Amino acid sequence: MDTLKEQLKDLYSKDLKQRSNWYSPAAEAYNKVRPRYPQILVDQVIELAQITANTRILEVGCGPGIATVSFAKLGCSILCIEPNPDFCQLAQKNCQSYPNITIKNTSFEEWELESENFDIVLAASSFHWIPPEIGYPKAADSLKDKGYLILLWNKELQPEYEVYQSLSASYQKYAPSLYKYEDQETQEAILKQLGEMSIDSEKFDNFITKNFRTEVNYTLDDYLMLLTTYSPYFKLEQQIKNDLFSELREIIQKKCGEKIKLFYSSAFHVMHKKVGSADIIE
C-alpha cells in the first residue's frame, strides 16, 4: 500500500496547472485509443446505483468523455468537471448529441461546491489525481443524503507475457524503468488498494466492488499510440522514444503481425455517502 500511496502522491502533489495540462500532448491519442469501460461493468453500476433519467450526476475529471457517454444515454443530467482544456474540447465534441451534459473547464479543487446537489459523484480513472484530503470530503459534501460515489477504473493494457518478454532487451536498452509487466493478479491487487483508500477516507460506507477482465485486439499502430498516453512515457526524450518504438514495432510485427492481443482489468467501486459525513469545504 505504501508504494502505491507514494506513487499517487507523486501525481496529486504536482502543481495544479501541471496536473491540468498533463495529458495535453496526448489528448487526441487518449481519446482515440484508451480502452472503454466494459458494458457489463456500466450496466451493473447503473443497477446498483439505481441510475435513471431523473438522476443528477457530477463527473469529476471526465477527460474526453469516455465514460460520460455511457451514462448520458440514459438521459440523466451530468455536470462534468475537467481541468484540461484539450480534453474539454474533445468531450464537447463526443457529447454533442446529449443536451443533458454540461462541461466546465475547471479542476475539482477550484470548482465552487454545490452542496448536497447530486445523487451521484462519478470519477472514471481520475480520482487518484486529486489529493484525498480534498477529493473524498468534497465528493461527500456534493452528494445528497444516501448519494453514491462511483469510481471506475481501467488498468493499463498488457500483451501476452511471452510477447512482453520478447520486448525486454529493447526496454533495457532505452528505458529500463518502463519494463514492468502487470498480470491479472497484480492489476487486481492495485484495484483493491485503490478501494481501500476510499474506505479509509471514512466518508463513505456500504462499499461494493467487482473486477472484470477484458481481451481486446489493437492494431500495431494503435498499440504504440496507446503507450504514448501512459504517464511514464511522457518523460522519455523524443529520440529515445523514437528508437524504442522502432524496435518495439519490429519485434511485435515479427511475433504478432499487424495486430496484437491485449488484456486489462477493470473495476467499479460503488459506495454510499456516510450519514453525518458532510463537512463543508469553504
Image (cartoon, grey):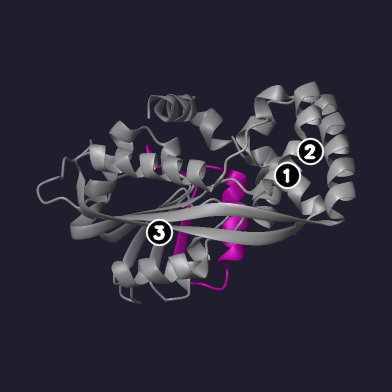
Q: Indicate which disc residue 162 carries.
A: 1
> Are there few (<14), some (14-19), or many (20+) residues within 10 Å of tag 2?
some
Helix, strand or loop under label 3: strand
Q: Residue at x 80, y 28 (%)?
A: 169
Taking the spot 59% from the left edge, 35% from the top edge, the residue there is: 22
The answer to whether residue 83 is above or below residue 53 is above
Figure quadrant of the C terminus: top left
Mark 3 in CB contact with mark 2 (< 8 angstroms): no
Vertical arrangement, residue 61 with respect to residue 167, above or below = below
| Left or right: residue 210 compared with residue 207 | right
Number of numbered discs overlaid on the protein picture: 3
Give the residue pinned by disc 3.
Answer: 79
In whole angstroms, how far apart are the C-alphas of marks 3 and 2? 45 Å
Magenta stretch contains residue 15: no
Q: Nearer the viewer, mark 1 or mark 3?
A: 1
Q: Which residue is mark 2?
A: 166
Res. 258 image quadrant:
bottom right
> Residue at point 51% right, 72% down?
98
Q: Which residues are magenta?
A: 83-110
Q: Secondary structure at mark 1?
A: helix
Q: Disc 2 to disc 1, how far (Cα)?
A: 7 Å
